[in-house]
Image: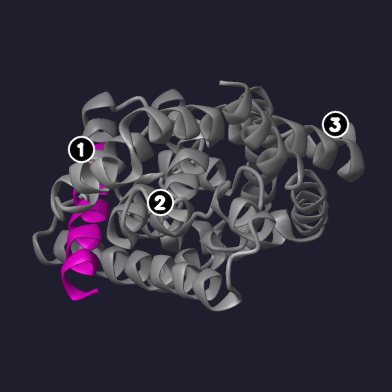
Amino acid sequence: MLHIIEHTLLDSIKLVPFLFLTYLAMEYLEHKAGEKTTRLVRKAGKWGPFIGGVAGVIPQCGFSAAASNLYAGSVISLGTLLAIYLSTSDEMLPILISERAPITLVVQILAMKAVIGMIAGFIVDLVIRKRHLHEHPHREDHLHEHHSHEHGEEEHEHNHIHELCEHEHCNCEKDGVFLSAVKHALKIFFFVLLITFVLNLVLHTVGEEVLAKVILDRPVLGPVLAGIVGLVPNCAASVVITQLFLEGVISFGAMMAGLLVGAGVGLVVLFRVNSNKRENLKILGLLYLIGVFAGIVIEILM
């Protein structure tokens, strides 16, 4: 047990400087580009899934929450919302960088999340248009007609998003870039510490080969289970999934399924701001099915 604790502490403490520097860069990026990105998505129209897929991979606090608010206000389409959910990086990027994962792997994961998000988003919007489904109309034309009203809505929406997001995850505006980066780094450090300890304990007790056979030899079960973990609306979910992949416990396809499904605080905000709970459950199910299906396909192809 002492050896496990010592090994866990050494593995986790060395990540702190990398986590802090990564979060410092992310908080600065959010501070400079957050509102501009949200504004770009608002005005994307039919190109929403493309803009959403690209913008989603850029690490910024509360972007999935912003998307949920925009969708609840009928500003963006369902396809755009799903593209953002599927491409959102959450805590995956800081973990990969702090663990010094190959840059090619990082780029591959981000590119796949963006492309899958775009494709799924365009297909969903196309199906909705073809079947004339207007359960939640996208008021694209209305936005271009009322610029002054839109500006007031945008300011109200920005305040509302940060009020929700602050409670769940981010305090960049309140604490400033430096302090917010410190808080994020420490929070994720403790998550990594806990996950690493549990994983080391399991590996020591069960054995690496047995654990690999239980999980890695089941190509469909892995993405299905990872997708369920990804649905947990907390940064711990993406930390667990990424860490398990880096430790060789789950496959690349399973990791992708979990990361695709993981929409950060976006789903929490959606259930708070969108009054149609049945529609929210449909979106949740669709997100899960797309993420798991993509994970299984990746598993088979790779």
Assess whether residue 84 is covered by the magenta stretch: no
Which one is in front in this view, the residue at disc 3 or the one at disc 2? 2
**What's the distance in space between the residues labelled 1 and 2, CA to CA?**
19 Å
The answer to whether residue 129 is left or right of residue 183 is left
Report the amino acid beneath label 1: Lys
Which residue is tagged 3? 174
Q: Residues within 10 Å of mark 1 (few under 14, many from 20)?
A: few
Which residue is tagged 2? 259
Q: Residue at x 33, y 68 (%)?
A: 116
Assess whether residue 287 is covered by the magenta stretch: yes
Q: Residue at x 76, y 32 (%)?
A: 186
Q: Position of residue 230 (x, y in %)?
A: 37, 40
Report the amino acid beneath label 3: Lys
Q: Position of residue 124 (x, y in %)?
A: 22, 61
The answer to whether residue 12 is left or right of residue 182 is left
The answer to whether residue 210 is left or right of residue 37 is left
Hey, which quadrant is residue 99 in on the image?
bottom right
Q: Position of residue 32 (x, y in %)?
A: 81, 59
Q: Residue at x 46, y 27 (%)?
A: 201
Q: Position of residue 4 (x, y in %)?
A: 57, 29
Q: Is residue 121 above or below residue 88?
A: below
Report the amino acid beneath label 2: Leu
Q: Magenta stretch: give its range.
A: 283-302
Q: Quadrant of the C terminus?
A: bottom left
Q: Main secondary structure of the magenta part?
A: helix
Which one is earlier in the sequence, the residue at label 3 or at label 1?
Answer: 3
Which residue is tagged 1? 282
Q: Residues within 10 Å of mark 3 (few under 14, many from 20)?
A: few
**What's the distance in space between the residues labelled 3 and 1, CA to CA?**
34 Å
User: In this orientation, which residue lies closer to the viewer: 219 or 263?
Assistant: 219
